[in-house]
Amino acid sequence: MAISMSTLTSSFASLSFSSQISQNPHSLSFPRSKPPRVVVATPRLAVVASAVAAPSAVDLETTNLKKYVKSRLPGGFAAQTIFGTGRRKCAIARVVLQEGTGKLIINYRDAKEYLQGNPLWLQYVKFPLAALGYESSYDVFVKAHGGGLSGQAQAISLGIARALLKVSESHRTPLRKEGLLTRDSRVVERKKVGLKKARKAPQFSKR
């Protein structure tokens, strides 16, 4: 059956295509919806930076002890009458005795704290008073410098013994009997040339 060209042209012209059809037939388009906006309220933090750090408990204790010592020793260590100076190795200790309850303060710190709780060093410090039975009769105030804690403890012992002589000359005999009035002159021997220490030699190698 023969179809004329005019019939086909009229049939195609009658068809109308929508302009909204996408040129890509395989792509699907969906309307995009904006997600809900979530607003999180963040509290404002007020940070106040202090220019000076808060003093620690140790600093407060040292400050209080310093005030206490100054109140007990008007005029300082040099103005006191019952005093004694002890030396051991490179350590020097200036000791002041006052009637009290047995407090022992070294460089504005408690003796047990200053000597790190070492029982031997504490025994050195307390022995002169214990030898005369004055453990709880006098307060001891000490300024020590130089050397180590062991040398300072022995220097304090000699200083306390010498200060007790200012209390009464009758204390000399019992203190001398215990050897507390003798200045220990022993010091570290100097290093020698060619040796590692005073007497230690390097290892000998024959070959």
Image: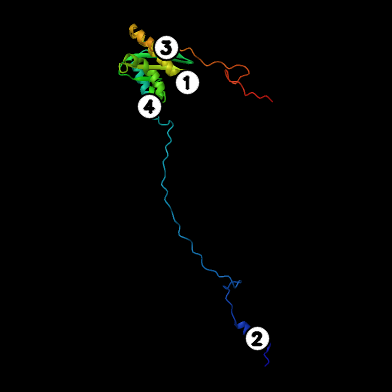
Indicate the amino acid at tag 2: Leu
Which of disc 2 and disc 3 is earlier in sequence?
2
Note whether 55 is above or below 161 in the view shown.
below
Question: Going by the picture, which residue comes out furthest to the front?
Answer: 206
Q: Position of residue 191 (x, y in %)?
A: 58, 17
Question: Going by the picture, which residue comes out furthest to the top?
Answer: 169
Looking at this view, is 57 or 31 the one in front?
57
Q: Could you give the CA–CA distance between mark 3 and mark 2, rounded to whole angstroms?
A: 133 Å
Which of disc 1 and disc 3 is earlier in sequence?
3
Indicate the amino acid at tag 1: Gly
How many labels, in total?
4
Quadrant, the C terminus: top right
Q: Position of residue 73 (x, y in %)?
A: 35, 15
Which of disc 1 and disc 2 is earlier in sequence?
2
Q: Do residues under tags 4 and 2 come within 8 Å of each other at their CB atoms?
A: no
Examine the rendering and report whether any part of residue 83 can be seen. Answer: no
- Which label was assigned to residue 78? none
Looking at this view, is 148 or 28 the one in front?
148
Q: Quadrant of residue 107?
A: top left
Q: Could you give the CA–CA distance between mark 4 and mark 2, rounded to whole angstroms?
A: 109 Å
Indicate the amino acid at tag 4: Leu
Q: Position of residue 70 (x, y in %)?
A: 36, 17
Name the residue tied to disc 3.
Answer: 85
Indicate the amino acid at tag 3: Thr
Residue at 33 percent of width and 20 percent of height:
103
